[in-house]
């Protein structure tokens, strides 16, 4: 499809997919997230030259939530290397809910199955270099800003406080990791959680999310500044996890129906990419039973089918 056709067709696709928002509900277990408009849907597609195609509600900010886990994984890999990271987390999908602790107890050696479930992302947060939680958060924000093309992203403090105050399951996971010695003796659990909640609460727009996805689409090379920001090997690892685990325990279905690397968050955001071509940012706050945007997933499936994006 030619660029002009895409520009004309994208609003029609958004209009059709928006109807699927009624199949979901806005996340309410983090009270601040419940304030998002349930019927909103927006998308930005960004190409290698910085050209963008947007439709729907792309201007309102939303927090990254689990999308941030892709980028903290990359930073942890750059800080510790593959051996250091995979000593603490596995490489397998779980088939369980993103906040499940089931396999931490049932499967030896008791480390999280992958870095994109909550337990895994908490372990990854402990690996980010920095002397204090504030220093770690500062490094994370700096990396996110660089990935977003020099943006000035910030933490939504209201969401951070809301998330921290209601995160009983995540606290349980973190203390379980401490008991299993995934978090070392020297690590303060509450310090790790503070870092985790803050990076989940970083606020972005569709355009900024698409810009971050563009970096992944080009294997860590930023085509707009002409520089390799992340080693290609680490981006390959992250994209593999996105295919296997990026859409929670609906990742297999998403791989079959949509067929591109993606990572969702419970704010309704989805970061997706077409390798070597596009970075994509989607927001649709109404979530289905597995925690993914109902309208957003439908839109990505529509686009992938029409534009032949599937990588398989």
Image (cartoon, rainbow, N blue to C red):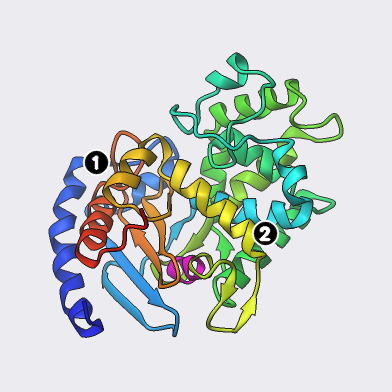
Magenta span? 209-214
- Was residue 167 drawn as part of the magenta stretch in this picture? no
Percent across and percent down for residue 283 are 34, 58
Q: Image point 35% across, 53% down: which residue? A: 312
Q: Image point 56% across, 48% down: which residue? A: 160
* Residue 48 shows up from this direction: yes
User: Looking at the picture, does residue 144 appear above or below residue 122?
Assistant: below
Percent across and percent down for residue 71 are 59, 56
Q: Nearer the viewer, residue 105 or 169?
A: 105
In the rendered image, which residue does mark 2 sit on? 140
Label 2, residues with CA under 10 Å away: few <14, some 14-19, many ≥20? many
Q: Image point 64% across, 39% down: which residue? A: 122
Q: Earlier in the sequence, mark 1 or mark 2?
A: 1
Q: Nearer the viewer, residue 161 or 65?
A: 65
Q: Is residue 84 left or right of residue 149?
A: right
Q: Image point 34% across, 44% down: which residue? A: 292
User: Looking at the picture, does residue 50 appear above or below residue 154?
Assistant: below
User: Looking at the picture, does residue 117 appear above or below residue 230?
Assistant: above
User: Looking at the picture, does residue 278 appear above or below residue 225?
Assistant: above
Considering the whole magenta stretch, tell me its main secondary structure: helix
Badge count: 2
State the quadrant of the N terminus. Answer: bottom left
Q: Determine the secondary structure under disc 1.
A: loop
Question: Splitting the image into 4 quarters, where does residue 87 fall?
Answer: top right
CA gap, disc 1 to disc 2?
Answer: 31 Å
Q: Is residue 51 left or right of residue 69?
A: left
Percent across and percent down for residue 18 are 18, 56
Label 2 near label 1: C-beta < 8 Å?
no
Label 1, residues with CA under 10 Å away: few <14, some 14-19, many ≥20? many
Q: Determine the secondary structure under disc 2.
A: helix
In the rendered image, which residue does mark 1 sit on? 24
């Amino acid at each position: 499809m030619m660029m002009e056709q895409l520009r004309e067709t994208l609003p029609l696709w958004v209009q059709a997919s928006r109807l699927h928002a009624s199949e979901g509900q806005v996340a309410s277990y983090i009270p601040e997230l419940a304030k998002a408009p349930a019927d909103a849907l927006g998308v930005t597609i960004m190409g290698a030259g910085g050209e963008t195609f947007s439709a729907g509600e792309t201007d309102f900010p939303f927090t990254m939530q689990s999308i941030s886990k892709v980028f903290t994984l990359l930073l942890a890999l750059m800080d510790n290397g593959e051996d250091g990271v995979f000593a603490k987390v596995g490489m397998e999908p779980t088939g369980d809910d993103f906040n499940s602790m089931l396999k931490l107890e049932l499967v030896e050696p008791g480390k999280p199955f992958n870095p994109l479930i909550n337990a895994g992302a908490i372990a990854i947060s402990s690996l980010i270099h920095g002397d204090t939680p504030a220093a770690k958060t500062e490094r994370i924000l700096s990396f996110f800003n660089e990935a977003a093309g020099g943006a000035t992203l910030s933490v939504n403090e209201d969401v951070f406080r809301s998330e921290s105050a209601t995160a009983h399951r995540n606290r349980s996971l973190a203390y379980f990791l401490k008991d299993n010695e995934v978090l070392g003796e020297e690590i303060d659990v509450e310090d790790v959680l503070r870092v985790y909640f803050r990076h989940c609460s970083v606020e972005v727009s569709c355009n900024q999310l698409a810009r971050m996805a563009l970096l992944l689409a080009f294997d860590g090379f930023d085509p707009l500044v002409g520089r390799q920001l992340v080693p290609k090997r680490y981006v390959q690892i992250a994209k593999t996890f996105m295919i296997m685990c990026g859409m929670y325990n609906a990742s297999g279905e998403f791989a079959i129906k949509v067929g591109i690397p993606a990572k969702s968050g419970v704010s309704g955001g989805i970061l997706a990419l077409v390798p070597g071509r596009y970075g994509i940012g989607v927001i649709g706050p109404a979530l289905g039973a597995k925690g993914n945007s109902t309208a957003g997933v439908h839109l990505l499936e529509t686009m992938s089918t029409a534009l032949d994006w599937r990588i398989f």
